[in-house]
Structures are given as C-alpha cells and as structure tokens.
Amino acid sequence: MGVTCVCQVPLAEGKSVQQTIDILHKKLEQLGAVKQGNFTVDCETYHATGNASGQPTKLLYVMHNSETPLSCLALFEGGPCLTADGNFDVLMIKLKSHFQNAKGHKVESRGSRYRYCDFLIKVGAVTMSSSARGISVEVEYCPCVVPGDCWNLMKEFMQSFLGPSIPELPSVFATKPEGLYVPADCVDTMTQYLELFSKVRKQQVLPGTTR
C-alpha cells in the first residue's frame, strides 16, 4: 500500500447520493480509469460495561476492509490500535460481559474500485441503518510511502475529478514527519475512515440511499 487519502465528498447540487456517485464514476472513466471490482469498509462500535471508576466509557471500534479480508482492526478511542484475526467479531461476542455492541451504530462504505495508472480510487456510499449518510472517496498513490513527496501530485489528480472538493493533507500524516511506513499504512487508512464515519454519524439522513 502507498500513501492513501480518505475524504468525504459533498453531494452535487440537486443530486442524490447515488446520482453524485454516478457523476464521479463518469468523470473517472472519462479520465481513463478502469473499474476493478468493488470494496467494503465497515465499522462496529462497542462500549465497555461495568465501569466502576466513574470515568467516561471508552469506545472500541472494530473495522473491516475488503482489501485485507483475513484481518480486522480494533481501535480504542484515543488509542491504542490492534490488528487482529478476521474472526475477532466472534471473540467480541464472547466478551459481551465487558463490551456491548452499540446497536444501530454500524457504519459502512460500499462501492466501486477503480485503477488509473499508479492511482487506486474507491468511491463509496456511506450508510448507517440502511440510510444514506454521504459519499467517501479513497485515493491511494501506490508507488510512494512518503506523504510529503507525493501530496501535490495526489491533490492535482483528485482535483481532476473532485473539482474544488479536494481535502487538506490528512491529519494522520502530521505525526509521521519521516514518512508513511508500510506496517502502519492500513492503520492510517482505517483511522481516516473512522474519522469520516464519526462525522457522518452526526449528520441527518440524506436522500438517495443505495441499499
């Protein structure tokens, strides 16, 4: 994996979620991008039970990515982060006396995966409780692992199909002055998805659910 940026894209004026996604697909295809299957990223939220200290309960997020089907990520609110086996969810069921699933809080992004030269692009509809909450775009520049060396190139590419909606440098890179190292890159990508999912949880339901 290379340097990856995950961002939320606003709806096109007067368009639904699916209509805006169709517009992005068309722009990518006009550039010459080729569709290469689909992708899914999801996030389940758990909260600790039996907190006797009176401190606020820390949340635990369990995330899956179709790019890494044999593993999943468990991120505690504010850290730390654990890369676990794909069946970690089964363990969470057994730990239900310690961690309760926050029902109705599952968020997922599901959509199409495109390849354009050295870029991998994923455009997904973000849903929660089967309701459309927004659009995610993930752009990966595969040959590079140092954000500072390729961010301007990534911005230029994203502008070609996102227009003025291009994001700022992801905050996760600010803690990596020497670059994005391979063992951590999936964690950095999923951290960006978690930030995006946290934002869309607070949004109202949008028209045009895709499920």
Image (tube, helix red, strand yellow):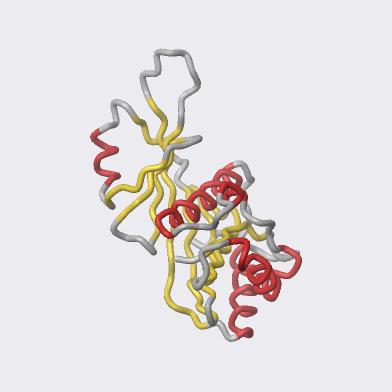
Compare residues 186 and 108 and report the one nearer the observer.
186
State which quadrant residue 60 falls in: top left
Q: Position of residue 149 (x, y in %)?
A: 61, 66
| Image point (45%, 33%), residue name | 59
- Image quarter where the N terminus lies is bottom left
Q: Is residue 38 above or below residue 126?
A: below
| Image point (72%, 63%), residue name | 165
Q: Position of residue 3 (x, y in %)?
A: 53, 63
| Image point (51%, 76%), residue name | 114
Compare residues 211 and 61 and report the one nearer the observer.
61
Q: Is residue 136 left or right of residue 55?
A: right
| Image point (57%, 60%), residue name | 5
Q: Position of residue 205 (x, y in %)?
A: 61, 49
Q: Is residue 167 above or below residue 202?
A: below
State which quadrant residue 46 falls in: top left
Q: Is residue 171 left or right of residue 184?
A: right
Number of numbered discs overlaid on the protein picture: 0
Q: Is residue 142 above or below residue 180?
A: below
Residue that sits furthest to the top in the current view: 53
State which quadrant residue 6 falls in: bottom right
Q: Position of residue 116 (x, y in %)?
A: 54, 80
